[in-house]
Image: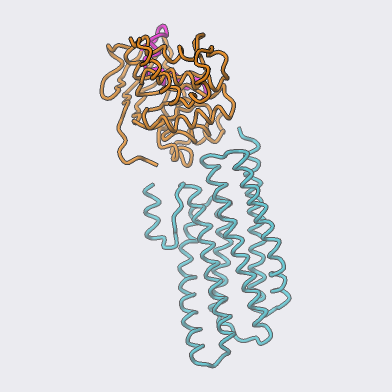
């Protein structure tokens, strides 16, 4: 149900994105609310992942990409001249496949804080423990922090990646299909984690799993062919969407 | 395309149609038995009620299994959810037909004149039930809303008949026991009208996604349109 007062964390206005000639995002307008989980759904190639990546300027890494419009984070424009490293510290990202660095569990989590200048061992210890606890992984790995991160299970690796992201104390967490490579138990752990984390973070998640969007998100945005077709409370979208295209997609009658 | 789900939904509608047909047959037999004080027919309705319960329970199992296996959303979710609710109303209507039939068995040995308005009320309620089932299967909002409006006439007849029966009880001309039985019949008829209205409310829900009480349609229709 809609919260009493929801603050707009991210405001997207008339966002267009082109890959060369290809118009990948078309005039997107969307408000993302603080302390909520926002799910992005839609068929492959609809632009939802592209949209997710614009929120921390990951598309800057793609050649021939052109972006127009405006995205503000807490009222400050992020599409113009900003320090993207600082932006990505505030807006962290978790990818589809767990991608731990080939180093110890400890070093994976400490990586970000070290880059941002923290060197003191006691401080790093504290951050590592806090982040692993927040990612609901501490109890499973606390006795083998110096072991390679590649030796833990896929579900644990994904939670490690979340811990690594949390270690830099972001405000927004972007997740691109974070459970698509995981089994149902690991998936439910990540989903529970989203529920816990949203108290302190704003979460935007791309998912192909409709039930997952239903289970964890407060709002759902349906993308199709680069357009934001419908954006509303998840309960509304899954119960009675306003748009026929949304209806057809979520009931599996597309194409 | 979700072939399996589409097929299951169509099967579900067919089964609602069959259950609806059984309920309508029960009502027809009951009202005929009431007119003719036909005990055999009344007994037939009572015996047949088990088959209706069984059919309802089968549809219920199908709905729950579709929730578990197909995870329906939006239109499909509303259709299966409302089916699960409306079959309870259908089953209750059949229960009331059986209840009336029980009373017919008590009244039959000493038949007395039944007020013609009771037959008028029965006819209206029967008509509401038939149209509510059709409206559900065909997703016909207009009929659904019309049925809800018709319930006012049934309620009015109910109030008038209760007053009439109360007067008869006071006058002491007829057996009080029989008059109380007839009062119950009138009450069951009124409830049948309510259940038909409930079914129609689920028709509206299927379309609008909002469940509202439509028994006083003038006030509620405006709210629905605002959505």
Q: State how many labels appear.
A: 0
Name the one closer to the observer, B129 or A138: A138
Whether A247 is among the magenta residues is: no
Q: Is residue A30 visible?
A: yes
Q: Colour of chain A?
A: orange
Q: Residue at x 46, y 78 (%)?
A: B160
Write the residue at 52% across / 42% down: B75
In which quarter of the view is residue A132 placed?
top left
For this view, does A249 lie left or right of residue A78?
right
Q: Which chain is cyan?
A: B
Q: Is residue A242 left or right of residue B172?
A: left
Q: Nearer the viewer, residue B131 or A231?
A: A231
Q: Would you identify the image quadrant in which residue B92 lies?
A: bottom right
Task: Specify whether B66 is left or right of B207.
Answer: right
Residue A59 within the magenta-colored segment of the rendering: yes
Q: Is residue B178 above or below residue A221?
A: below
Q: Is residue B59 above or below residue A77?
A: below
B204 up-or-down from A88: above or below: below
Question: Where, quadrant-wise, is the C terminus of chain A in this rendering?
Answer: top right
Q: Position of residue A101 (x, y in %)?
A: 49, 10
* Residue drawn 43% across the image and 13% down it: A22
Does residue A47 show up? no
Residues shaded magenta: A43-66
How far across and down, in percent of the image, does residue A177 sit? 50, 23
Residue at x 35%, y 9% (from the top left corner): A119
Quadrant for the N terminus of chain A in the image: top left
* Residue A15 locus on image (x, y percent): 34, 21
Q: Nearer the viewer, residue A20 or B64?
A: B64
Q: Position of residue A137 (x, y in %)?
A: 49, 24
């Amino acid at each position: 149900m809609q919260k009493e007062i929801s603050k707009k964390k991210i405001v997207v206005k008339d966002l267009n994105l082109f890959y060369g000639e290809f118009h990948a995002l078309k005039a997107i307008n969307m408000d993302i609310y603080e302390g909520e989980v926002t799910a992005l759904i839609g068929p492959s190639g609809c632009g939802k992942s592209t949209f997710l990546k614009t929120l921390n300027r990951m598309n800057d890494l793609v050649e021939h990409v052109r972006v127009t419009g405006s995205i503000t984070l807490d009222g400050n424009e992020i599409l113009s001249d900003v320090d993207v490293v600082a932006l990505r510290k505030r807006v962290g990202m978790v990818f589809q496949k767990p991608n731990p660095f080939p180093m110890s569990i400890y070093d994976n989590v400490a990586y970000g804080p070290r880059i941002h200048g923290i060197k003191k061992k006691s401080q790093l210890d504290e951050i590592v423990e806090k982040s692993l606890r927040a990612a609901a992984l501490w109890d499973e790995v606390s006795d083998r922090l110096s072991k390679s991160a590649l030796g833990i299970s896929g579900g644990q690796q994904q939670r490690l990646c979340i811990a690594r992201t949390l270690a830099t104390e972001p405000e927004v967490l972007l997740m691109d299909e974070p459970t698509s490579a995981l089994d149902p138990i690991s998936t439910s752990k990540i989903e529970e984690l989203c529920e816990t984390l949203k108290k302190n973070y704003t979460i935007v998640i791309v998912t192909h799993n409709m039930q997952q969007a239903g289970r964890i998100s407060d709002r759902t945005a349906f993308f199709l062919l680069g357009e934001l077709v419908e954006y509303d409370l998840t309960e509304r979208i899954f119960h009675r969407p306003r748009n026929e295209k949304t209806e057809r997609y979520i009931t599996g009658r597309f194409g | 395309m979700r072939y399996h789900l589409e097929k299951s939904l169509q099967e579900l509608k067919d089964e609602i149609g069959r259950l609806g047909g059984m309920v309508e047959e029960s009502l027809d037999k009951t009202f005929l038995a009431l007119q003719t004080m036909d005990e055999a027919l009344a007994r037939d309705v009572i015996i047949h009620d088990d088959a209706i319960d069984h059919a309802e329970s089968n549809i219920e199992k199908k709905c729950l299994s579709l929730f578990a296996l197909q995870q329906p959303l939006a239109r499909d979710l509303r259709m299966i959810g409302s089916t699960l609710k409306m079959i309870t109303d259908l089953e209750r209507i059949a229960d009331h037909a059986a209840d009336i039939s029980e009373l017919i068995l008590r009244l039959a040995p000493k038949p007395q004149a039944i007020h013609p308005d009771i037959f008028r009320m029965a006819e209206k309620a029967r008509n509401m039930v038939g149209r509510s089932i059709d409206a559900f299967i065909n997703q016909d909002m207009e009929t659904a809303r019309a049925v809800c409006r018709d319930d006012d006439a049934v309620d009015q007849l109910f109030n008038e008949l209760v007053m009439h029966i109360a007067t008869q009880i006071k006058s002491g001309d007829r057996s009080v026991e029989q008059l109380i039985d007839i009062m119950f019949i009138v009450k069951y008829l009124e409830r049948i009208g309510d259940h038909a209205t409930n079914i129609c409310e689920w028709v509206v829900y299927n379309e609008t996604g909002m469940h509202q009480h439509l028994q006083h349609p003038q006030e509620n229709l405006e709210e629905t349109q605002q959505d």
